[in-house]
Amino acid sequence: MTEPVRCAWSLHSPDETRYHDEEWGVPVYDDAGIFEFLTLEAAQAGLSWLTILRRREGYRHAFAGFDANKVAAFTQADVERLLLDTGIIRNRKKVESAINNARRFLETAAEFGSFARFIWGFVDGKPLQPKRRKVEDIPVHTPLAETLAKELKRRGFSFLGPTVVYAHMQAAGMVNDHLTSCFRYPHILDLGAQGFAE
């Protein structure tokens, strides 16, 4: 059986291939899923996604199953505990950022009714479909990612600059950056057709 055509970045390891085939670009409309991705992507800053992907279960365990309410309640004692946890990246600023971001996440969700409503509002509720044909066509960030990153910073979030925010937009399906030749492209196109629904 012939292997399907995939985005080239996904071919380096089985973990990346699985993530590409099952998750990357699938629209995430629930706050729990969005909080998980934002936490992991902020942890990724300056590192490879594979480094974080391989620690995902460690992060899930360390950060209370990515329950924003529980993470927001973490104390300084939890920070010290997490800095001893070999299942995550033991960077004090990133650990403290995850807790801070959980609090800002809940504040934003309370203001808009859900965090999903807030973030999907930046693309009018529907995934962007730029139809990338070559890897070189995929940007590191976009003006929209810069706008969203500025708004998150204004709201007190940290470790979520334009590049990390664009990675989030790709991962959580706010933009379909699968190449048009990739076997996942039409699937993601179909999944995004409905858009964000209350």
Image (cartoon, rainbow, N blue to C red):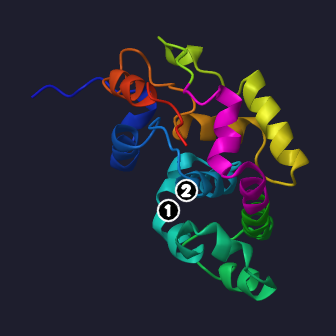
Q: Which residue is mark 2?
A: 52
By secondary structure, the bulk of the magenta-drawn segment is best described as helix
Check if mark 2's residue and mark 1's residue have beta carbons within 8 Å: yes
Residue 59, by quadrant, is bottom right
**Element type at marker 2?**
helix
Depth check: give the residue in front, 177 or 186.
Answer: 186
Residue 90, by quadrant, is bottom right
Badge 1, how many Cα within 10 Å: few under 14, some, many 20+?
some
Badge 2, how many Cα within 10 Å: few under 14, some, many 20+?
many
Q: Which of the numbered marks, if any, corresponds to residue 56?
A: 1
Up the image or down, 184 lies above or below 114; here it is above
Up the image or down, 49 lies above or below 110; here it is above
Left or right of 35 on screen, residue 194: left
Up the image or down, 123 lies above or below 40; here it is above
**Element type at marker 1?**
helix
Residue drawn at the location 51% of the way across and 14% of the way down? 132
Residue drawn at the location 86% of the way across and 50% of the way down? 155
Query: Which amino acid does the dot numbered 2 rest on?
Result: Ile
The residue stretch that appears in magenta: 105-127
Up the image or down, 18 lies above or below 1; here it is below
